[in-house]
Image (tube, helix red, strand yellow):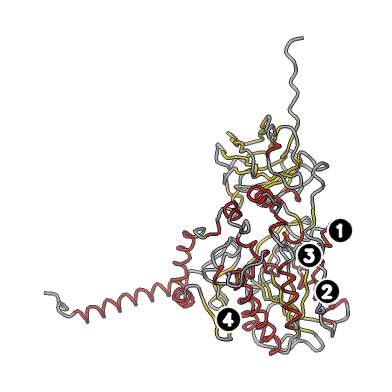
Amino acid sequence: MPLLAGRPIQNLALAIGATLAVLLACEGVARLFLPPPRYHREPVAFDPLLGFRGIPGHRQEGVDELGRYAIELNAQGLRGREIPAEPEPAPEGALRVVFVGDSFLVGQAVRQEQLVTSLVEAGLRSRSREAEVYNLSGIDWGTAQELLALRELGRPLAPDAVVLFVYPANDWINNSMLLAGRTTVSAGDAIRPYLVPEGGELRLRHLDPLRAFLRGHSRLFAVLERRVLATTAGRTPASEDAGARLREGRAPREDLELFRSHDPGDRWEQAWGTSLELLRAFRDECTALGARLLVVVVPSVHQVVVTPKAIGLDVTVRLARRRPLDALLDWDLPERRLAAFFAAERIESLLLLRPLREGAHHGGRVYARDEHLASLGHEIAAAPIVDWILSERPAGGSALPELGSGPVALLPDAATAPALLDFHEDRHQDYLGDGWISWGPTTGGGGAWLIGPSALAVLPLRDGDLVLRGWAPREARFPIEGQIAVVGGPRHPIRIEEPGRFVLRYPGSTRDARAWPTAGGYLALVLAPGETHRAGPVPGGFYVEALGFEAAPVREADGG
């Protein structure tokens, strides 16, 4: 008989002890050899307090019209000036300004010197005022995470001024546990901390408190959990059918509910209530720090310019509701509500909606392709912030500011637009939505766009054949099989047998075009070749040299 037979309590204790010893050993190995897991495709890693923040020391490359540039994060995983290890006063006579925000302040689409934080510091110095500007921002952060970051990282800096960038199109979702997991624009919901109004206070909450505790105390659990999350992503209502939503009287996407009014008990109204409480808490925190607060409200790209994505949504709305997108959504609603709130709460604010619309109206590109502010957008924001810092007066009055006359149309009248988008010399970016990865010269001369597994474009509807010209890289998997889908219209097959140049022509493709829905004479279509290869870390499809409508080729008559 075994020595411990008949002694179940001792056996259980030994088994538990052995299990704990193994787990502790595994935890030690995990901490030694496994970095904190990444919960994003973006360069962010797990953080016990903030949920996630930028990866310390991360470096990547961006590309703009001037060429390649470096995007670097400092030792705290932030972009910009390092935060001192020990609290120290600002240099004699220098202002200390702390910016707090999300990906709009991380600003991957612009060079460091074009970022609003850099422009404000340079602007202050040009007006003979020394300043230290710090950038406390993280991709996909909500207002609660930004408040926690200010308390953890901003308090030791003892700032003279705090500039909070608010982006309601994401932040209201990031701030609300009721909206967690319901959209595609809020990837960090499962792990972000929430500050929830309860009993007159903001209390720290997580979607799953037990997992949050284990995640914060065990590297092994965090790594294993990340593998599980990776296999369960996409199983949320974020993939709801737009047509079904529209037929039920809702916006075509959940995040666009921001631009509609709701009943008091609706989850969006509760998200508004939570977000406004967080703004009050920001004001109170800055008051306790002895710092002035300016809240800068950044609008969605759809509020400022009519994008190809908006044209595609407009077509979808017309199909389901027989009315345009602008009749369903109120693009100025968030700014009107916030302006009234700021006036009532005596919070200084800067609404960028009108200045950005004016910049776009005069031909400027105020948003980058990733729908964050382009360098001009950062310039437009920086100038009034410098004025506010140097001014003793509040940034704005109590009256509702003029917001402009709606999103600015970037495309010409459809009758004068090019029927064929030839990318050899012109990128034609205003006609292109998601999925157009990068433009560059080809070996045969001219330029072409690398597209991903699917890519959205808008075209003026014209008579003729739909034509797609391009080339398939050798590393692609063949045959490439996919489709060109006209939103609300026909679908045409894509089949490419071998690498090299190809021409796909669909004769008579506009024969029934009058039945196709358009928005202002433009139709939306999606090129969907699927993923054929990897272009570095990016899934690629093929290269597009031209897309649009052409007259059918003239055939020579047989005989003499």
Q: Which residue does the numbered mark 4 point to in the structure image?
A: 197
Kindly tell me whether residue 31 is visible in this rendering.
Answer: no
Q: Is residue 377 above or below residue 526?
A: below
Secondary element under disc 2, as helix, strand or loop, is helix
Compared with 94, 144 (above or below) is above
Query: Helix, strand or loop at disc 1?
Result: loop
Whole-angstrom CA distance, mark 4 to mark 1, is 43 Å
Q: In the rendered structure, which disc, 2 or 1, sits on the residue that comes first in sequence? A: 1
Q: Provide the secondary structure element on which disc 3 rests.
A: helix
Residue at x 47% of width, y 73% of height = 208
Q: Upstream in the sequence, badge 4 or badge 1?
A: 4
Identify residue type, mark 2: Pro
Quadrant for the C terminus in the image: top right
Q: Quadrant of residue 407?
A: bottom right
**Depth order, front residue of 157/395:** 395
What label does residue 362 carry, if any?
A: 1
Task: Give the amino acid type for the residue marked by disc 3 in the picture.
Answer: Gly
Asked whether disc 3 touches disc 2, contact meaning CB atoms under 8 Å apart, the reply is no
Q: Nearer the viewer, mark 4 or mark 1?
A: 4
Q: Could you tell me residue 44's position as x and y percent?
A: 59, 68
* Nearest to N terminus: mark 3 or mark 1: 1
Residue 11: x and y, percent? 22, 78
**Which numbered tag is attached to residue 377?**
3
Q: Amino acid at mark 1?
A: His
Nearest the viewer among 406 and 164 is 406
